[in-house]
Image: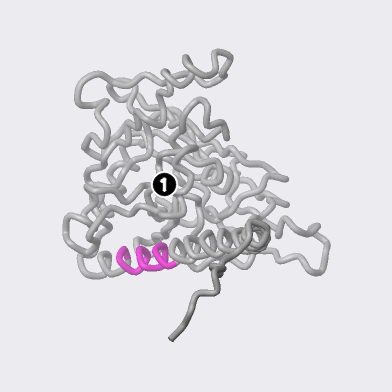
Amino acid sequence: MFRSTGREAGFTLLEIVIVLTIIGFLLAMIAPRLGTIGTSSVKTIDESNVKSLRGYVMLYQQDKARLPNKPITVVNSKGKDSYQLPLTDDGDTKNGPESIGWEFMERCNLQLHILSEEEADELKRTGIRKVAVLNDYLGSTNSEYIKDYDEDSELEPQTFSSGDEGRPFYIRDAEEGLGVLMVGAHATSDTGRIKVEVEEGDDLGNPEWIYRIVVGVGRDCSLVTDGMMQNEGLSPRGMQNKDFNTYNNYCMILPRFKSTLNRIGKGEPREIEVTDVRYDKDDEKAEQKICDLGRPQEMWEVDVCSPLGYKWPQDTVSMWKITDIKENF
């Protein structure tokens, strides 16, 4: 039979403090590693999703001989047949989130482009007969944030079309005068010439996408409504930035249209040479390539990307510098 010695076993206050100090020290070392693992995992999932989306789009195209209908045109309607480019993340959470992430804009140099009648007809021939207009109130107005937190903000709240045309994800026909996103180039009217907004020395993530239209995979897209995907294409990596921007849908990069090339004026690029931004052009380590921008593309050449502008498979080079431009004459 055990007897009590009159002294209860336990830890002194000093011992407890020492143990807690050691635990805190260990957590301080481990926590950053855990954070890196989490970020790395989300990046891996995002890359896998882009790969899967590419497969879904290709299967849809092969099965139905067209591209998915009712994608998102990532613009805001400010009046009948009048559109505006959504605001881009300015890195300031005090004035609320904007629509488009800065990395997407930086990698793709997105521009507001107005479709001509010929482009609208070519768009419909791909199977895209209707689109959902983004009309991102949360990521574009910011009026309350600007008023409450930053009276000196340079951001200007955007106004939207009245009625249904200004409603988020309003469905409208793909027709002449529709506003869309285009990589690196744009026309300001349905009858105007297309101008390029890149020049030698500029950096781009995907320079071969210049003159191509970008649309999003949303809840109304036929990839979802036809059952190929269970939900709209939202990026977990993009949603980590929800305090900075609100548009986090995966995108399709449509083939370059013949009708778009027909709108390019003299002096605009038809071919560009690019070099890995990490090296000088003459550095033997520099990877280089030539992007043919003057060739119309087939429907199967559709591409996909994340809302940060990353495609699958990724290039071995993350960003390219434009080193030479051959113009159209």
In this rendering, the answer to whether 310 lies above or below 172 is below
Residue 294 screen position, x and y as percent: 52, 53
Residue 229, image x and y in percent?
A: 24, 61
Q: Which residue is drawn at 40% across and 23% down?
A: 141
The residue that appears at 49% across and 18% down in the rendered structure is: 146
Q: Indicate whether residue 230 is drawn in magenta.
A: no
Residue 297 spot, x, y in % from top left: 42, 59
Which of the pair 225/44 is nearer the observer? 44
The residue segment tinted magenta is 48-57
Q: Main secondary structure of the magenta part?
A: helix
The one of 323 and 202 positioned closer to us in this rendering: 202
Asked whether 49 falls inside the magenta stretch, the response is yes
Residue with the mark numbered 1: 213
Q: Nearer the viewer, residue 27 or 18?
A: 18
Q: Which residue is drawn at 22% across and 56% down?
A: 224
Give the residue at x 44% y 41%: 242
Q: Residue 107 or 291: which is nearer the viewer?
A: 107
Q: Is residue 19 left or right of residue 98?
A: right
Q: Position of residue 257 (x, y in %)?
A: 40, 50
Residue 309 left/right relative to 129: right
